[in-house]
């Protein structure tokens, strides 16, 4: 049954035949077919297709068309903007996806390549270890390596023919011997057998060498006198100074020479190309070639002044004169060439002659006129030249001002008036007119001239702003015209300023002028500001500080007298005046000023205390007591009570001091300084340490935030041998006052004094975590280290607190111990500049200069310390507040403090 072949096998299906149609199946298509899926009624089209292809052998190409290929699939549809946008979006998505996979793809490819090279290494890689071993063999082992030909001998045919040796004729051997030898005999200046051209003539070589040497000597000879400029003694030394060029530099020069040659050949009218080529040859040491190249440049670019100037600079003086003479024939209007020609002349008359010739060709050159005027020694001749110059160059302000300076007062006025009419936009002419009036002794006209200048310039449109006028004022001050400077400031300082911005802006301007060193300009600004704001205390104070730093005692006194008239309630101004009188040893004047201050400020604490200080330091202790008694009744502040107790303590009236302290503490129990003075009297003066400890314990309960009281209590307990109790006290203080570096420093010092270095280092580590920017703490940390490690610790300290005077002073001390004197001095100066109120820096610096400096350097330290008047510093305050040093001045305290300092170990 199954072996019989059916008759429909291999035949085409009948029309409209659909397989399975009888059991309800319908037609369908796959991706290989073309067109949509067919429904059951689409049989007619298939029938037509089937009937049409029965009679032909051509295959339907549409059946194999890819449906993704839209060119053929949708070729009948229009390709509009939406289709283009869709294609672009799909392309961007595809690129994005490819970009995301790039890293993984590259990593995979790299891994596959490494695996491939590992599986199939190159021959060179297989023998790399053997190649490295070749570095260890010597010449004998290398020579013992057999040749390659000796190793392949199996299939090599052995030459069975015996070797033959045929003797050569003697003529051939003699000819070879003569060919390899040199002729050493001289036969009348000619060589024998010269026809073959193989013999050497040493005589001609020597003559050529002498000729070359003579040419070189001629090049360095003086063309004027004919005498050589070669130094016979320094000739060999000069040869040693010749720079030897490497092969790379020579190659670069050759490349550059080729490029410049191409440039000058392709564009001979480009002057910089010729100049660069000449400079290259000069740099290469070929001065002759450089002169030749630049000469060709002058031929091709005769109207370029830079080429001529380059040519002149590459030649001798005499040749340069000839070159520049040729240059002015081509470019008679070039000012640079004329000035270069003037510089080449050594005689004054020749220079004048060249300049006058130049002015014939270039009469409107200000540079030439200025050079010509500077050459004249006679003022009358200079005036004649300037008169002619302003006729030819009437718009040159410089020439007008130069002529005005040479004229008399009346003629100068005339000249400046003409200049002002000719150049109405020039402010320099107006300022010169004001300076002329000041120099002639008519100060009243100076201000009028500047006021007219401001009006006239505003009318012509040449308006200068405030900053430009201030710069002109500073110039006038530097030139010595103080009145002109003041007039400029008074007339122009308020230009384009709002009323509310004037004061702040003027104060900033004054500080800027002080920073520039223009003291008179700053003084004029303060004077103008005080005219407009006479009741402003801050302006008076700044002006007083200026006079104190840069003025005289008389000018400061006059300023302060005017200041207290306008600001009678300003206590600082009264105190400054009284202090200046006291410093000048005028006690009566100081008393008079303070009496006036009392009348203006009857209950002022500062004035009361200043009067007490004047009396106490003048040894008028009874007057001081009476003043303090009145002050306690009138003012009664805590500082008055403190000064009263201090005066009694100074006079060693301890019972009276303790009575005042008891009374003061009843009124002000939270004022820590009263507690401190009471405890110090009990401890130091009366030696009652237990009572002093009780006082300090009460004090820290009433003033728990007072650092000095905690430290005094800890020191007293340490003094009594209670080190553990002192540690506990400081621990309580640090708990009550966190992040306080002074408490950490005192704790570290207690451990150091107790010989417990490890505990001190551990405590310093904790302290740095809590207070990383404390200079005093870093100082202790540096001193805890051994000397080799201190430098590294100081670097860490400078990183954390670069501008701390204590750290900078510590670094200076480290340099001092290393005997680096200049570095130590520089660092001491830095420390003083950072903080002028730090007295310890001055004391260390003075001690350093006593050991390594001169008397002038020691006096410099004292002067700077007196000018700064420091008040702070651990050692400084200990000396200054000592009762035995009360009343001593800054210089004396400096010397006492320096004497108590001990160098670091």
Image (spheres, helix red, strand yellow):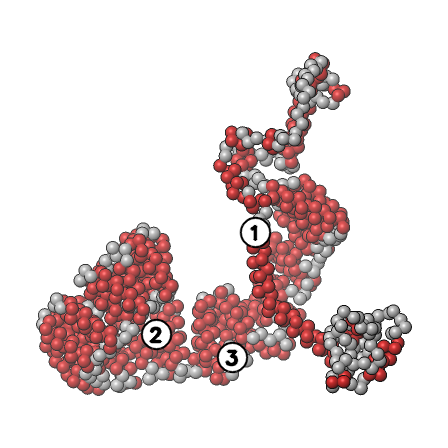
Q: Position of residue 504 (x, y in %)?
A: 45, 79
Crowding at dot 1, Cα within 10 Å, few <14 / some 14-19 / many 20+, comes out as: few
Q: Which residue is mark 2?
A: 557
Q: Which residue is mark 3?
A: 494
Q: Earlier in the sequence, mark 2 or mark 3?
A: 3
Q: Residue at x 65, y 52 (%)?
A: 339
- Separation of residues labelled 2 and 3 (CA atoms): 28 Å
Q: Is residue 297 visible?
A: no
Q: Earlier in the sequence, mark 1 or mark 2?
A: 1
Q: Position of residue 558 (x, y in %)?
A: 36, 75
Q: Is residue 123 above or below residue 549?
A: above
Of discs 2 and 3, which sits in the foreground? Answer: 3
Q: Which label number is shown at residue 429?
A: none
Of discs 3 and 1, which sits in the foreground? Answer: 1
Between 896 and 618, the residue placed more toward the observer is 896
Mark 1 and mark 2 in contact? Answer it, CB < 8 Å.
Answer: no
Between 243 and 381, the residue placed more toward the observer is 243
């Amino acid at each position: 049954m199954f072996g019989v072949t059916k008759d429909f096998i291999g035949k085409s299906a009948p029309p409209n035949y659909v397989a399975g149609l009888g059991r309800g199946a319908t037609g369908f298509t796959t991706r290989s077919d073309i067109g949509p899926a067919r429904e059951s009624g689409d049989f007619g089209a298939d029938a037509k297709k089937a009937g049409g292809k029965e009679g032909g052998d051509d295959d339907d190409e549409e059946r194999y068309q890819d449906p993704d290929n839209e060119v053929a699939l949708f070729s009948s549809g229009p390709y509009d903007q939406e289709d283009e946008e869709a294609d672009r979006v799909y392309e961007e998505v595809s690129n994005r996806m490819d970009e995301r996979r790039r890293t993984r793809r590259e990593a995979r490819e790299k891994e596959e390549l490494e695996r491939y090279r590992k599986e199939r290494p190159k021959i060179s890689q297989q023998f790399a270890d053997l190649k490295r071993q070749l570095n260890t063999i010597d010449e004998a082992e290398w020579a013992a390596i057999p040749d390659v030909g000796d190793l392949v001998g199996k299939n090599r045919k052995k030459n069975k023919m015996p070797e033959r040796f045929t003797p050569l004729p003697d003529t051939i051997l003699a000819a070879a011997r003569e060919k390899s030898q040199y002729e050493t005999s001289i036969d009348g200046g000619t060589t024998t057998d010269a026809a073959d051209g193989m013999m050497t003539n040493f005589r001609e070589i020597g003559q050529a060498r002498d000729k070359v040497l003579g040419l070189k000597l001629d090049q360095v000879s003086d063309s004027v006198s004919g005498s050589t400029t070669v130094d016979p003694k320094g000739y060999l030394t000069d040869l040693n100074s010749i720079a030897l060029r490497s092969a790379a530099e020579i190659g670069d020069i050759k490349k550059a020479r080729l490029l410049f040659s191409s440039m000058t050949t392709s564009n001979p009218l480009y002057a910089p190309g010729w100049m660069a080529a000449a400079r290259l040859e000069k740099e290469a040491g070929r001065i002759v070639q450089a002169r030749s190249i630049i000469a060709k440049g002058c031929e091709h670019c005769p109207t370029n002044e830079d080429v001529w100037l380059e040519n002149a600079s590459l030649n001798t003086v005499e040749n340069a004169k000839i070159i520049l003479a040729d240059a002015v024939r081509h470019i008679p209007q070039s000012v640079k060439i004329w000035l270069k020609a003037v510089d080449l002349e050594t005689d004054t008359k020749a220079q004048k002659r060249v300049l006058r010739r130049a002015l014939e060709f270039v009469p409107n050159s200000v540079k030439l006129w200025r050079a010509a005027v500077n050459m004249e020694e006679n003022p009358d001749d200079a005036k004649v030249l300037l008169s002619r110059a302003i006729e030819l160059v009437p718009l040159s302000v410089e020439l007008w001002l130069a002529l005005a300076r040479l004229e008399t007062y009346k003629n100068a006025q005339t000249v400046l008036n003409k200049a002002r009419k000719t150049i109405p936009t020039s402010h320099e002419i107006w300022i010169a007119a004001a300076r002329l009036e000041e120099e002639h002794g008519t100060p009243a006209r100076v201000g009028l001239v500047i006021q007219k200048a401001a009006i006239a310039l505003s009318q012509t449109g040449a308006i200068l702003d405030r900053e430009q006028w201030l710069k002109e004022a500073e110039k006038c001050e530097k030139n010595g015209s103080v009145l002109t400077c003041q007039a400029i400031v008074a007339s122009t300082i308020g230009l384009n300023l709002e009323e509310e911005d004037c004061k702040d802006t003027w104060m900033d301007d004054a500080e800027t002028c002080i920073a520039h060193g223009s003291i008179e300009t700053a003084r004029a600004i303060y004077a103008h500001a005080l005219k407009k704001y006479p009741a402003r205390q801050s302006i008076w104070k700044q002006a007083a500080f200026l006079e104190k730093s840069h003025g005289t005692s008389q000018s400061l006194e006059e300023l302060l007298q005017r200041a207290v008239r306008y600001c009678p309630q300003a206590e600082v101004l009264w105190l400054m005046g009284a202090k200046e009188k006291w410093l000048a040893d005028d006690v009566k004047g100081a008393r008079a000023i303070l009496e006036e201050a009392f009348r203006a400020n009857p209950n002022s604490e500062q004035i009361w205390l200043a009067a007490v200080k004047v009396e106490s330091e003048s040894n008028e202790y009874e007057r001081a007591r009476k003043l303090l008694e009145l002050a306690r009744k009138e003012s009664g502040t805590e500082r008055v009570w403190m000064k009263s107790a201090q005066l009694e303590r100074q006079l060693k009236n301890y019972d009276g001091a303790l009575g005042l302290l008891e009374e003061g503490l009843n009124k002000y129990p939270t004022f820590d300084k009263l507690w401190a003075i009471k405890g110090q009297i009990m401890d130091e003066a009366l030696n009652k340490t237990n009572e002093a400890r009780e006082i300090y314990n009460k004090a820290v309960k009433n003033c728990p935030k007072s650092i000095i009281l905690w430290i005094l209590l800890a020191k007293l307990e340490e003094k009594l041998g209670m080190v553990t109790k002192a540690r506990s006290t400081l621990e309580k203080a640090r708990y009550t006052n966190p992040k306080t570096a002074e408490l950490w420093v005192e704790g570290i010092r207690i451990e150091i004094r107790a010989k417990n270095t490890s505990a001190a280092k551990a405590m310093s580590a904790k302290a740095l975590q809590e207070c990383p920017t404390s200079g005093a703490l870093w100082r202790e940390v540096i001193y805890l280290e051994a000397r080799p490690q201190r430098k590294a610790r100081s670097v860490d300290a400078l990183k954390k607190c670069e501008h701390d005077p204590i750290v900078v002073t510590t670094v200076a001390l480290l340099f001092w111990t290393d005997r680096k004197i200049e570095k130590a001095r520089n660092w001491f100066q830095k420390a003083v500049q950072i903080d002028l109120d730090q007295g310890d820096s001055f004391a260390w610096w003075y001690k350093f200069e006593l050991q390594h400096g001169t008397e002038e350097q020691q006096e410099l330290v004292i002067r700077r310390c007196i000018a700064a008047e420091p008040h702070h510093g651990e050692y400084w305050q200990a000396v200054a507040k000592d009762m035995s040093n009360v009343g001593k001045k800054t210089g004396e305290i400096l010397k006492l403090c320096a004497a108590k300092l001990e160098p670091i170990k």
